[in-house]
Image (cartoon, helix red, strand yellow):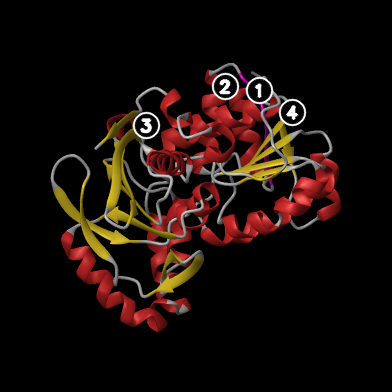
Amino acid sequence: MSDLSRCLVYGAYGYTGDLIARLAKEQGLAPVLGGRSESKLKPLADELGLPSLVVGLDDADALDAALADFDVVLHCAGPFVRTSKPMVAACLRTKTHYLDITGEIPVFEACARKGDAAAEAGVMLMPGVGFDVVPSDCLAQHLKSRLPSATHLTLSFASVGGGTSHGTATTMVESLGLPNAVRKDGVITPVRMGKLSRNIDFGRGPTAALGIPWGDVSTAFHSTGIPNIEVFTKVPAAAVRGAWIGGFMSPLLKTSFVRGIAQKRVEAAPAGPSAEQRGRAFTMLWGEARDGDQAVSARLKVPEGYTLTAITALDIAQRVLAGEVKAGFQTPSMLFGADFITTFDGVEREDL
């Protein structure tokens, strides 16, 4: 595996970028830490004894000059719906492989549309190398292998403990009032938020789960070819009712006033779950593939989401630098296979 010296971790001073930088240091790796704010980047780089590079995303020439020294970018600066476009464009111009930790459907789809251009440039675009979407993508591929004729895929997850980072919460605020999304007959289709709910057994009996516009609505289709996909997450039963009501209030939720109030609450909260919280937490995933009356299902237990993101993102960056690359748009399971997630400590998969 590579020492990551030719990897730029961009957005390293964000909550998840910081976790990735610290884990790299623990593993004896030395990526270059990047970001647009020197005042935020330099203290982290000095503390960890890692090289750093200050560059913004709004100066294409400066960004191109910066990326010329790297083989891969691990992009951690969200919200990715705003930041991924200039970074992807720069990677294509400089022939630098692109990885990120997004879970945003528009980002996955934008990268997929750039697949042919990336293949022509000899560049790999692999968004979603963290909790979004490594475990669920591998689970989807596993279910597809068990039922190759599957026409419908349902994925879901339940976080046990842990919390939410400022970056994730900000993305959620920017999504207030927007619809849920599903894949229907191969096409991403909006659905009123709160309309889709069901009970799912994550291993401790059925519990309420709400349909959400998770990244797998995009990626699982590219990975498996299954044309109908829905994604759910465990929520308190009352939240299902709240989301159903909220679905009718989308014009209000999209106003700058409401989003401004929500963002202030985000900024007043801790930056993300503490190391102690993350150490106690874990995530359960459940998935089902169906074709008519035939169905297969499985559960997957993985470490807490942010912890897993740091682990899988660093592993994939090392693999790319070691030559495990396929030019064009890729998902984790397309390149590394359904069993990739099972190679990490703390992961258990059970066929049901």
Judged from the image, the secondary structure of the residue bearing numbered disc 1 is: loop
Relative to residue 136, is residue 215 depicted above or below?
below
Q: Which residue is mark 4?
A: 6
Label 1 to label 3, Cα distance in Å? Answer: 22 Å
* Residue placed most toward the observer, 11 or 134: 134
Q: Which residue is mark 1?
A: 30
- Is disc 2 in contact with disc 4, using a CB cutoff of under 8 Å? no
What are the residue bounds of the magenta stretch?
A: 29-35
Label 1 to label 4, Cα distance in Å? Answer: 9 Å
The percent position of residue 240, horizontal first and vertical second, equals: 22, 66
Relative to residue 59, is residue 242 depicted above or below?
below
Judged from the image, the secondary structure of the residue bearing numbered disc 2 is: helix
Label 3 Cα crowd, 10 Å radius (few <14 / some 14-19 / many 20+): few
Q: Is residue 43 left or right of residue 209?
A: right
Residue 25 is tagged as 2
The percent position of residue 296, horizontal first and vertical second, equals: 30, 44
Q: Which residue is mark 3?
A: 275
Image quarter in which the C terminus is found: top left
- Is disc 1 in contact with disc 2, using a CB cutoff of under 8 Å? yes
Q: Nearer the viewer, mark 1 or mark 4?
A: 4
Name the residue: 56% across, 40% down: 334
N-term-proximal mark, 2 vs 3: 2
- Is disc 4 in contact with disc 3, using a CB cutoff of under 8 Å? no
